[in-house]
Amino acid sequence: MNSFELTDHLLFTATTDKGETLSQEQCARMFDLLCHADEAETQSPPAKFNDLKAELLKGLRLQLRNTDAQHLKHEVSKLNRWAEDRIYISEKELKDTKQRIKVLNRQAEQATEPQEQLDIQKKIRELEKRQRKQRQEIFDAEDRIKDERDRMIGEIEHRMQRNFTERDIFTVRWRIN
């Protein structure tokens, strides 16, 4: 089966001669028993097996859907954390620059020497250039996040294309002595 990940599953169906259905675990345990081959007549499985197999496949598909939902939830959560980190870092840098501009403006108001005021104004001009650049970086980060989200959604859509290949491998008739 191919969902988020390519996986193989063995489904066992079995009934007793009295028509009692055996569980998956009981069927799997039978393969742990010592046995020998017997040349018995070949019989096709009872029609009930198709119903049992359909029921098992339905359960497996539900299990895979739940697993896929967990994968999707994890991937979206990971993307959101990454996006929040990218924006937080950019906004923090911008906030720090704004704070430094505010401090320099106060210093410029208190400066008494013209050269000192000119030096402070040059620093403010440089910080304002940096501030504009940081704002643009926030927009660029948001664009990268949007592109990454679009890429991730496309990848998830592709990975969620379920392909079920069903194949009967063998039929065995058991007799336990």
Image (tube, rainbow, N blue to C red):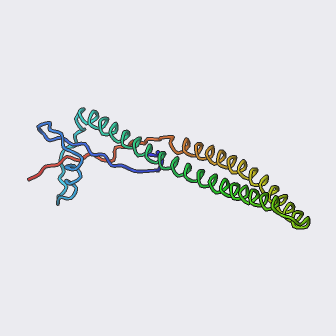
- In this rendering, would 114 be left or right of 79? right
Q: Residue furthest right?
A: 114
Q: Name which quarter of the figure residue 15 lies in.
A: top left
Q: Residue at x 85, y 58 (%)?
A: 125
Q: Residue at x 65, y 56 (%)?
A: 92
Above or below: residue 106 compared with residue 158? below
Q: Residue at x 69, y 51 (%)?
A: 141
The percent position of residue 60, horizontal first and vertical second, equals: 35, 42
Q: Residue furthest left?
A: 177
Above or below: residue 61 compared with residue 175? above
Q: Residue at x 60, y 43 (%)?
A: 154
The percent position of residue 31, horizontal first and vertical second, equals: 22, 55
The percent position of residue 115, horizontal first and vertical second, equals: 91, 67
Q: Name which quarter of the figure residue 167 lies in.
A: top left
Between 5 and 33, the residue placed more toward the observer is 5
Between 27 and 136, the residue placed more toward the observer is 136
Above or below: residue 14 compared with residue 30? above
The percent position of residue 59, horizontal first and vertical second, equals: 32, 39
